[in-house]
Image (cartoon, grey):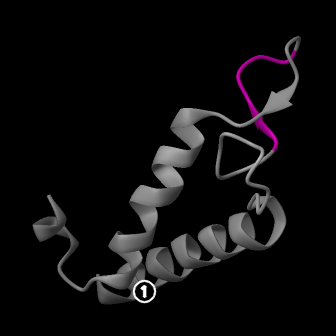
Amino acid sequence: MEQKREYYEETAASIVRSLYLNYFLQDPDHAGILKESLYHREIGSCCTVFGDYFYVEAIPRLLKDDWLRYW
């Protein structure tokens, strides 16, 4: 069980790291955190509130040992 936990924690950290390195917006003129999210293919890519929400949600869960107390 502990082996699976480590695997999923490492995978989650890798995903968040990739989002930061490849999609994090550092432009104050944009109203979002991550670029190239997608509402619908015909609309194109933009920032999305749900993409930003889950990105921000993931960070404290990765940094805290007892993430259930987060809420």
* Drawn side of residue 42 relative to residue 70, left or right: right
Question: Is 4 one of the magenta-colored residues?
Answer: no
* Drawn side of residue 38 relative to residue 64, left or right: right
- Position above or below: 65 against 21: below
| SS label for mark 1 | helix
Q: State whether the magenta stretch is mostly helix, strand or loop.
A: loop
Q: Position of residue 41 (x, y in %)?
A: 85, 18
> Depth check: 12 or 36 in front?
36
- Position above or below: 69 against 33: below
Question: Is 38 one of the magenta-colored residues?
Answer: yes
Residue at 79% over, 56% down: 27
> Hey, what amino acid is under mark 1?
Glu
- Position above or below: 44 against 22: above
- Total marks drawn? 1
**Mark 1 residue crowding within 10 angstroms, few (<14) / some (14–19) / many (20+):** few
Per the image, the residue denoted by label 1 is 6
Q: Position of residue 51 (x, y in %)?
A: 58, 42
Q: Point out the stretch of residues depicted in magenta.
A: 36-41
Task: Name the quadrant containing residue 32.
Answer: top right
Q: Position of residue 70 (x, y in %)?
A: 18, 66
Q: Quadrant of the C terminus?
A: bottom left
> Depth check: 36 or 26 in front?
26
Residue at 40% over, 57% down: 57
Q: Quadrant of the N terminus?
A: bottom left
- Position above or below: 22 against 32: below
Residue at 45% over, 79% down: 9
Q: Position of residue 43 (x, y in %)?
A: 85, 14
* Drawn side of residue 68 relative to residue 37, left or right: left
Outermost residue to the top: 42
Residue at 55% over, 78% down: 13
